């Protein structure tokens, strides 16, 4: 597969979001998750995304099991933020508060290294910016981990432009991870231009609109019990009705190009710049294979203009009120 560069980190043009293999999207299958991660490498997808929060703690362990014996063939990104002192694997109610302090940066990395079964992490993100701790303190501690060889690159997730500038002044930030897709285009106003200016790579998560743009479900009732999308603002009520029209347009354009809706959505993200590396998440090899094939989909300027002109506006916020307060800080 084609490779792209996040600042100075070379990765496959499409990554693999591993979260759903362990949490948040209903039923899971540990063995299929392992097989999916290993199949990714066969397809040339070497960039894996996980986090302490996913599970909690269980997703890092799953990734560690899957990459055993092939560690150096993968580029591993994980994230810290919330206190895990009393966390019970698989029980989100035991996760503590967020903490961007230098002390927590240092204690967090050791747990991730152990669960992943490695002595270094390629890209270590702060999962959300802690408004109570100066970003300079957090990034300063991350820079010390780089100097010690425990991590190789620093990332932030859902950080705003001013925070990016302040962080990058302390230590080069390799990548910003933020939701970006055909129905989440907020980063285009300020965040993407700031990344381009500072030379920071951009890692869009949920490029398929959490599966909705792929046409994989049309109602909350289509989803497993326990799937957080069942109560998401964009998937319920009048918002759902409006967004079904958006998904239908994606499906229409994809059919005309003889590709799947998911492939069209990923190809659109790839077309926004060669410093973008989307990480569509899946827990099944079938969808992984379809998603990886999006690198071969060519969108013309006419295609891109049509998408801009014809896609309806998304309806509803990305998260509930509490979740929205953690974004763009």
Image: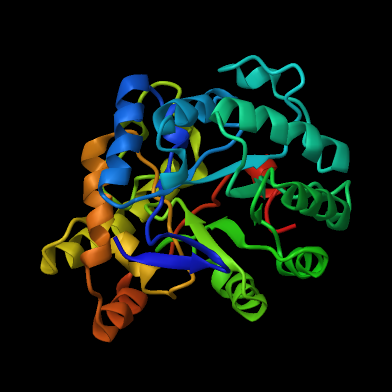
Q: Is residue 38 visible?
A: yes
Q: Is residue 274 above or below residue 107?
A: below
Q: Is residue 82 left or right of residue 103?
A: left
Say which residue appears at 38% left-offset and 62% top-offset: 13
Please tell me which residue lies in front, 317 or 15. Answer: 15
* Residue at the spot 50% in from the left edge and 39% down from the top edge: 232
Image position, residue 105 (x, y; %)? 78, 40
Give the quarter of the image for residue 314: bottom left
Residue 298 horizontal/vertical position (percent): 23, 74
Name the residue located 20 percent from the left edge and 67 percent from the top edge.
Answer: 253
Could you tell me which residue is drawn at 34 percent across and 47 percent down? 212
Is residue 195 rendered to the left or right of residue 106? left
Quarter holding the N terminus is bottom left
Q: Nearer the viewer, residue 42 or 19?
A: 42
Task: Evaluate whether residue 248 shows in this view.
Answer: no
Number of labels in the image equals 0
Q: Is residue 101 left or right of residue 32?
A: right
Furthest-bottom residue in view?
301
- Rendering coords of residue 194 (x, y %): 65, 75
Q: Which residue is at the front of the view, 212 or 258?
A: 258
Picture coordinates of residue 120, whole percent (x, y): 62, 41
- Figure colour scheme: rainbow
Tell me the quadrant of the picture where the C terminus can be found: bottom right
């Amino acid at each position: 597969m084609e490779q792209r560069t996040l600042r100075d980190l070379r990765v496959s043009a499409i990554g693999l979001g591993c979260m759903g293999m362990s949490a948040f999207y209903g039923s899971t299958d540990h063995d299929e998750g392992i097989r999916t991660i290993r199949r990714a490498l066969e397809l040339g997808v070497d960039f894996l995304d996980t986090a302490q929060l996913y599970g909690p703690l269980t997703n890092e362990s799953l990734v560690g099991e899957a990459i055993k014996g092939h560690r150096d063939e993968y580029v591993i990104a994980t994230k810290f933020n919330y206190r895990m002192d009393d966390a019970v694997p698989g029980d989100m109610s035991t996760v503590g508060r967020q903490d961007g302090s230098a002390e927590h940066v240092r204690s967090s990395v050791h747990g991730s290294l152990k669960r992943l079964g490695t002595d270094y992490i390629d890209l270590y993100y702060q999962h959300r910016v802690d408004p109570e701790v100066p970003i300079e303190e957090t990034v300063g501690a991350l820079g010390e981990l780089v100097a010690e060889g425990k991590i190789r690159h620093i990332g932030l997730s859902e950080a705003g432009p001013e925070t990016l500038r302040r962080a990058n002044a302390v230590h080069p930030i390799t990548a910003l991870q933020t939701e970006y897709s055909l129905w989440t285009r907020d980063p285009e106003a300020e965040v993407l231009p700031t990344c381009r200016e500072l030379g920071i790579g951009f890692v869009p998560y949920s490029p398929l609109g959490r599966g909705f743009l792929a046409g994989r479900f049309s109602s909350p009732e289509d989803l497993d019990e326990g799937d957080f999308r069942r109560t998401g603002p964009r998937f319920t009520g009048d918002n759902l009705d409006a967004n079904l029209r958006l998904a239908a347009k994606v499906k229409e354009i994809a059919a005309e190009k003889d590709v799947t809706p998911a492939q069209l959505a990923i190809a659109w993200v790839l077309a926004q710049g060669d410093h973008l590396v989307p990480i569509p998440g899946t827990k099944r090899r079938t969808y992984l294979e379809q998603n990886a094939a999006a690198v071969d989909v060519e969108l013309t300027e006419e295609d891109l203009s049509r998408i801009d002109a014809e896609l309806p506006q998304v309806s509803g916020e990305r998260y509930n009120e509490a979740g929205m307060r953690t974004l763009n800080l």
